Amino acid sequence: MASAPEHVDVLIVGAGLSGIGAACRLRRAYPSRKCVILEARESIGGTWDLFRYPGVRSDSDMHTLGYRFRPWAGKQAVADGDSILTYLRETAAEAGIDRDIRFGHRVVGADWSSGEQRWTVTVERGGTGEPATLTADFLFCCSGYYRYDRGYIPALPGRERFTGPVIHPQQWPQDLAVAGKRVVIIGSGATAVTLGPALAKLGARVCILQRSPSYILPEPTRDGLVELLRRVLPVRLGNAVIRAKKITAEMVIYQLSQRNPGRMRAWIRRRQMRCLPVGYDIDTHFAPRYDPWDQRMCRVPDGDLFQAISDGSLEMVTDRVDEVTEAGLRLASGQELAADIIVTATGLELLMLGGIELAVDGEPVQVRKRLAYKTMMLSGVPNFAYIIGYVNASWTLKSELVCEYVVRVLRHLDKHDYISVTPISHRALGRAPFIPDFTPGYMMRGGAQFPSQGDSKTWRSKLNYLSDMRALRLGRIDNGALQFHGPVKSPAPRNRALDSQGR
């Protein structure tokens, strides 16, 4: 007779920035509960373990990308990928949650049983795809929002004729030699403007080919005020003040961009002009057609992109690809770019919930047809939450608020002896975009797979940290949008024991 599947209290999917943070929060709140993290890859880190291209770094300052419960102590506000990966590994080890991670476990499906009031989760293990099953009281998806196995590559006519390698940064070969090579990077986002200067420093002759410009803002790697605050304030207070300063600065830039885009555009242009050679064609290469923060703004630490342009090691070209030739690229203007290596820094492929197929009582859940409750739960789906961080600020600011809210929900269940919670709309709600007024290419290509937000105040979440903090950290749990169910007879005992920190 087959044994019953292993049962856990909370099952976290993903051991990246969100998953590690979620596990640490849950361990602090409920040390006695069984919390397991399933990670499809063979190591901690998510994005920061996957992306290994030269120069990979944070696109937010580490004082907000780092966890509030374990402040970033490094001197560099913008950190390289290896430093971030080390930070995540140390955080997991200090909290002891690294022992709860099961690597090589890819979650492929999860079915909620209303009769048993639990999830049955289907997993593929290792490279063999060996199936396994677990059951869980609560399912917490922290797997990000894009495919890990491949990035987006647009159609490039004639690509098969090119005699050199065509590489996507998501699958960067670690033995690739670039010194003395002509490298054309196709793209205009954070990856392109990060990779370009890094390859130039390795001796490559770099050209960034962009179809249209992005907003690129130079900023110092180190912050003198932050260093002063660390010297004069107690550690805990200093970290809190530094974090608040960074959050406030980013919110001011975003709000000014929304309310007075022309003024923000002029400010960015002045910052760029200070870094570029006199007479440089800013209008062609650094003047986007859209307003600031309609797409994510790129940051370049110490203006390294502009330095590479100034010293001649990097060239910007704004044009469209007509076709790939044996020796490089022919552009719509007729110009030809010689290349030994082509890099397609053309973006991500979105993948909601890591591709997990959800079901409730055997009925498949079509995520795109559901309403998102506070952009972290799905209408009609019990005991389930997911994390998608901010697009206009540090990812972690939103992910930590979601983790805090999940802990509050679990405590509410325990306090009232409930067994499950489900977002339910008691009236017809209008539908609003999951992420409003945000138009990068990857969102235009794949945004249809995301749920919609309900258009009521109770359901909606704004792209605003202070607003979300009030709603998720301080707002009522039992607000009429969540439906709670009491205990049912279960085939396996549930661990409801809480210590003094859990109540």
Image (tube, rainbow, N blue to C red):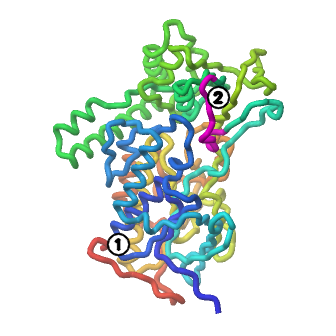
Percent position (x, y) of residue 64?
Answer: 37, 44
Name the side, left or right, on which 363 lies relative to 14: right
Query: Closer to the camera: disc 1 or disc 2?
Result: 2
Q: Within the magenta stretch, is there residue 178?
A: yes
Looking at numbered disc 1 in the image, what kind of residue is underneath it? Pro
In which quadrant of the rendered view does residue 208 lie? top right
Percent position (x, y) of residue 260?
Answer: 45, 26
Residue highlighted by disc 2: 185
Name the side, left or right, on which 381 lies relative to 480: right
Q: Is residue 148 above or below residue 209?
A: below
User: Residue furthest toward the top?
Assistant: 279
Q: Residues within 10 Å of mark 2 (few under 14, many from 20)?
A: many
Residue at point 63% right, 75% down?
A: 132
Looking at numbered disc 2 in the image, what kind of residue is underneath it? Ile
What secondary structure is the magenta-colored segment mainly?
loop
**Quarter of the picture holding the C terminus:** bottom left
Residue at point 65% right, 68% down?
A: 124
Residue highlighted by disc 1: 31
Q: Within the magenta stretch, is there residue 146?
A: no
Q: Is residue 12 visible?
A: yes
Foreground residue among 364 and 122 = 122
Label 2 residue SS: strand
Which residues make up the magenta segment? 168-180
Q: Is residue 423 above or below residue 43?
A: below
In which quadrant of the rendered view does residue 106 lie? bottom right
Residue at point 51% right, 14% down?
A: 311
- Which mark is first along the chain, 2 or 1? 1
Q: Is residue 295 visible?
A: no
Label 1 residue SS: loop
Q: Residues within 10 Å of mark 1 (few under 14, many from 20)?
A: some
Q: Is residue 106 above or below residue 252?
A: below
Name the side, left or right, on which 267 lies relative to 224: right
